[in-house]
Amino acid sequence: MMWPPDPPSKPPARSRVDAGIRPGPMAMSAWGPRGTTPMHAPPAGWHPEPAPGRASWLDSHRFRMALVAACTLVFLVTWLLPVDFGQHEPMWFPVGLHAAVEVFAIVVAMLVFGISWHAWQAERPSNVIIIACGSLAAGLVDFGHMMSYQGMPDLVTPASPQKSINFWLCARMLGALSVLVVAFRAWRPFASPSARYLWLAATLSIVALVYYMALWQPQAWPVFYVEGSGLTPLKVAIEALVVLVMAVAALRLLRARSENPPFDVDGLLAAALLWILSEMSLTVYENVNDFFSLAGHAFKLLAYLLVYRLVFVVSVRSPYARLASEMARSQSAEMQVEALAFYDGPTGLPNRALLRDRASQVLAAREEDDERAALVLLNVDGFKHVNDSLGHAVGDELLRSLGKRLAAIVAESDTVACLGGDEFAILLREVNNAGEVAALQERILEALSRPLEVAGQDLRITVSMGAAMSPGDGREFATLLQNAGTAQHRAREAGGNGWRFYDAAMNREVSERLAMRNGLRKALERREFELHYQPQVELADGRLVGVEALVRWRHPEQGMVAPLRFIPEAEESGLIVPIGKWILREACRQAAAWRAAGLDVPYVAVNLSAVQFQRGDVVLDVLEALSASGLPPQALELELTESVLLHDAEGVLATVRRLRELGVRLSIDDFGTGYSSLAYLQRFPVDKLKIDQSFVSRLGEGEDGRVIVSTIVQLARSLGLGTLAEGVEDEALARQLAGLGCRFGQGYCFGRPMPADGLAEWVAANPARLPAARTPA
């Protein structure tokens, strides 16, 4: 039996068609296009689970017998080995390890009892309760055995091997008898539900009697252990009796395997065999701390775990799986009936009715959250010619192939639908701006530039698409569909193989972004980028400690373009990778030039984008920049944002460590504005935290701003990191930051970003000029 699916529960209240299952060759999930399976229906090819008891490899007969064989081999080798490797030395099983093993075994025994007792129902087999009571008795008596072990504190009477063996033998015999009863007793319910309480009362009474005799009547027990001589024949005989009882139980269980029993006979058989190994190990030890004592306790623990596995399957997992199977079967039957009305026959995609239902829910949710959704309509250019020349069968196959390719492009949560003929629709549940919709349509055009294999031949097609976005282009499905159709018609009138937005303003916005993207590609070739440098100083005395390289774009027509306009577009398009590589090389070259000219600039700081870590080779770029410029690694600082450290953490960590090994400085930029975490601060070997200017600007607004900055400074200090405050606008703010323990600052107070040739003039005109501020110890 495979592990059951998520707990069956009543599906959330929504239209029943939303849980649709496909009748055709390719259906959508309840909210997604890829879905070859609906959200609440069993996957294709799925069948109800078989009878409980057949689970993963842990429950396989082969694994259990291999476990028993391995334990038997360990016992025989150590017992029969002619060479003495210290089996009987007391180092093997110290008191602490014994206590740990026994505590674990007691916990497992209590879990066996707890699960069996609380999950039991009147119609369940009574043998489970017998196993539970046997485990309860063994666990409680094992506690007395643990507390009586030599070296443990007194439990009423002093601990001793004799006292420990008294409890041990009782626990083993009680457990063996319970297994024997279960092996021979029919697997059926109690005649009366109250019978389980009688079994529990009898179990607790026997346990109480054992404790009374062991603690208050020690003289009544025969001698089982003689110091210096080891185990007495009587002790060995009783262990042999336990072995005999378990052997009888094992033989009965072995015979039961051929009778198709209603319980996990393999698990109980393996537990009985391990129990026998445990008893045999404890007939050959010479002191309570030797290897055989350890082996006996370990085998006992494994037997307990197998019994736990058995009762868990019977009491919890099997009923749970049967319930899940029944619910899935019922839902599948119901949805198969409903599906015929809500899916397109030729493609298996949701049809107009199901699209309307989903879109209505999406639009209502987006309006409530004040967010956007989008609808894209798509038609195949010249599809009539395909039908006329190749036949309708080939046309249907073409539509199926097109549907599959569209489903592979959109997100899991979106819906691809076929509205009839060659008209498709894509419902985008959540979009942030028109650029995302445009990007999707571009991906569709790119995907369809590759031929579709249909009926053994490659067909190339083009499509015309129109997009409408809520709420601007419509708040209801009908309005959105009409407007998307209008936009699609315009795309077809323009010659096809393209797309249009319904709203002209969106067209302009997207056109501007595309123009900027094209401009960025040309900017590197035309050398339109330039770097400006902003000083970073020590707050205590105004001494220059470094500069930060900031990229600027001098557009031939628009003039200086603000970084906030082109950096996001560069990151989204991936162009930040070659741009960032140029920035790194140019900053290193300029820093080396300053050094050659005698200008003391300790380091230059360069920002790295998360995209550079995802798509580029940062370490190689740094090595090339340092090699080409001759700049020492210690003179380069790389600024990472918190988002860099949170995506592919292991890969970024490896890169950061390699950079650190090169000797490059590392700092975290805009600290506190992202997902600030002590975990990554401890793992990532950075040198400095840059306090974001949003926190610095609030220093004068009240105590809250001061507390935030002070906390960041103290955090950095405790981790051995430096701090640099961004956006320092005046000397009063600089003094206040220095008083809070912040060592470095950057902002208009010291200097605006300036071209490279202006830095020498700034250094000459701005010697260390800030009055020293007292820095707290």
Image: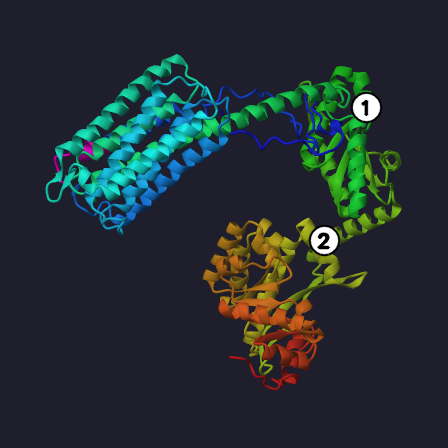
Q: Quadrant of residue 70?
A: top left
Point out which mark residue 420 bears. Answer: 1
Q: Quadrant of residue 697?
A: bottom right
Does residue 59 sit above or below 603 in this rendering? above
Q: Is residue 1 left or right of residue 571?
A: left
Which amino acid, by three-letter code, is at mark 1? Answer: Gly
Which amino acid, by three-letter code, is at mark 2? Answer: Glu
Asked whether 35 or 454 is in front, the reply is 35
Asked whether 406 or 28 is in front, the reply is 28
Image coords of residue 771 (percent x, y): 61, 86
Disc 2 marks which residue? 569
Magenta-colored span: 74-84
Marks 1/2: CA–CA distance: 37 Å
Q: Quadrant of residue 767?
A: bottom right
Q: Is residue 21 left or right of residue 1?
A: right
Asked whether 262 or 207 is in front, the reply is 207
For the stretch drawn in magenta, the main secondary structure is helix
Image coords of residue 553 (percent x, y): 73, 62
